[in-house]
Image (cartoon, grey):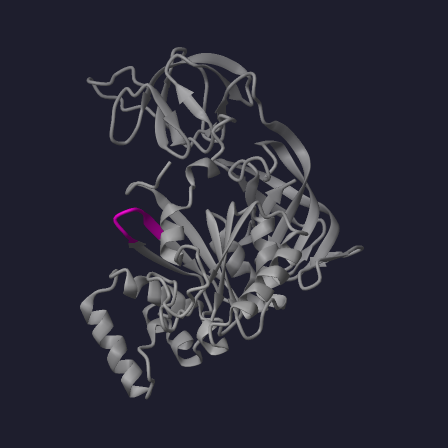
Amino acid sequence: MNATKSDLLRFTTAGSVDDGKSTLIGRLLYDSKSVFEDQISSIKKTSERKGLEHIDLSLLTDGLKDEREQGITIDVAYRYFSTPKRKFIIADTPGHIQYTRNMVTGASTANLALILIDARKGVIEQTRRHSFIASLLQIPHVLVCVNKMDLVDYDEKVYESIVEDYRDFASKLDIQDFHFIPISALLGDNVVNKSENMSWYGGATLLYTLETIQVANDYNHLDTRFPIQTVIRPHNSEYHDFRGYAGRLVSGIIRQNDDIMVLPSGLTSKVKALHTPNEQNVNEVFAPQSIVVELADDIDISRGDMIIKENNQPLALQEFDAMICWLDNKPMNLGAKYTIRHTTKEAKSIIKEIVYKIEISTLQRLENETNLQMNDIARIKLKTTSQIMHDSYRKNRFTGSFVLVEEVSNNTVAAGMII
């Protein structure tokens, strides 16, 4: 199936500092004509003022003053652009080890991870760290761009050696689909236009790959999971008896007249009608659409409940294992209480045990840990005050993910993936 204009691809960029992520995104925006003339004029003047030979396209993305002064990205910057074939949301994440949490944030909703490697340096620790996070977050597609090929004289052997090293490392990770492209973000080789300097490369350009990579199958259409966000009761004369259940269908398909079950009550009913924001009374809806469901029976349903198919149920547990990335400045201590937010449900929770912490640089497992610092990634045992209706993160990224919130400050302190 080819991409259509309505397709949306979310991708995150990652790489070491100075690998050229911001320049690459700037080149994508510039060469795909997604930049206003006044922006181009402004960055041309700035580049001339700096005495640069080439226009500094990274200025299109490095919006914070501190970033421009240091020439690095220190926060997750979201960019939007579109081509006739597809719409894009880019999460430009920082390269420093102390910003691991920023990459986790930017990558959590991504269909694709774009990992940059400096052709002069090859696969380094940062490459391994970012690839591990992409694997941990089960990002369906990984696109490895070997950048700065102009600085190694567009040497095919350098590129092939890096590809071989990366494949060897990636074989230890859970990455389902990856692609390699040799590029020069600074000069535009193989970004939007084919490079005349690398005739030995027979693959597609970066933009063509982003436009055509299939993302429709990234969504789980097998397991119907519809967490209720709100109950709609208009209470007016035209819709006097209307009762609709609104939310986002995070996975699966719902059709009119389907038999359904509501969790945690276990009550059953039949789908009477389906509505989307643009259309009334549709015959079927599929993930990830926002919908309103009417049921044939007037049963008690509220926010946090979940509509499913009776023969395909999620797990409903109060204790489970999860991988978490600690996001907060304050360290996590065993026994501390946090609010868990999972789909549309909230409950109290307690971290019972740290099974192990991962040393991201080496992928080594560190046991007997009692607290987590900011950016740490660990496997924990979590206990909640009420049942959490979930699937494993590997099976369903939406019902398998959660955040932990500190009750007093209301800060989001951890992002979690249920094992």
The answer to whether one can see residue 276 in this image is: yes
Q: Is residue 260 above or below residue 98?
A: above
Residue 23 in magenta?
no
Place of residue 57 in the rendered image (x, y in percent of width and height, measured from the top left): 33, 72
Task: Judge left or right: residue 17 versus residue 1.
Answer: right
**How many numbered marks are there?**
0
Q: Is residue 342 above or below residue 298?
A: below
Residue extent of the magenta highlight: 82-88
Residue located farthest toward the front when viewing the structure as drawn: 200
Task: Judge left or right: residue 310 versus residue 62.
Answer: right
Pick the front one: 296 or 157? 157
Q: Is residue 172 above or below residue 400?
A: below
Query: Which residue is pictured at 61% across the width and 36% down the height?
Result: 392
Place of residue 395 in the rendered image (x, y in percent of width and height, measured from the top left): 58, 35
Image quadrant assignment for residue 290: top left
The answer to whether one can see residue 329 in this image is: no
Place of residue 33 in the rendered image (x, y in percent of width and height, measured from the top left): 24, 61
Pick the front one: 356 or 167? 167
The C terminus sits in image quarter? top right
Query: Which residue is pictured at 25% across the width and 26% down the height?
Result: 279
Task: Judge left or right: residue 192 versus residue 180.
Answer: left
Task: Judge left or right: residue 220 versus residue 356.
Answer: left
Pick the front one: 77 or 2? 2
The N terminus sits in image quarter? top left
Place of residue 4 in the rendered image (x, y in percent of width and height, measured from the top left): 30, 40
Residue 85 in magenta?
yes
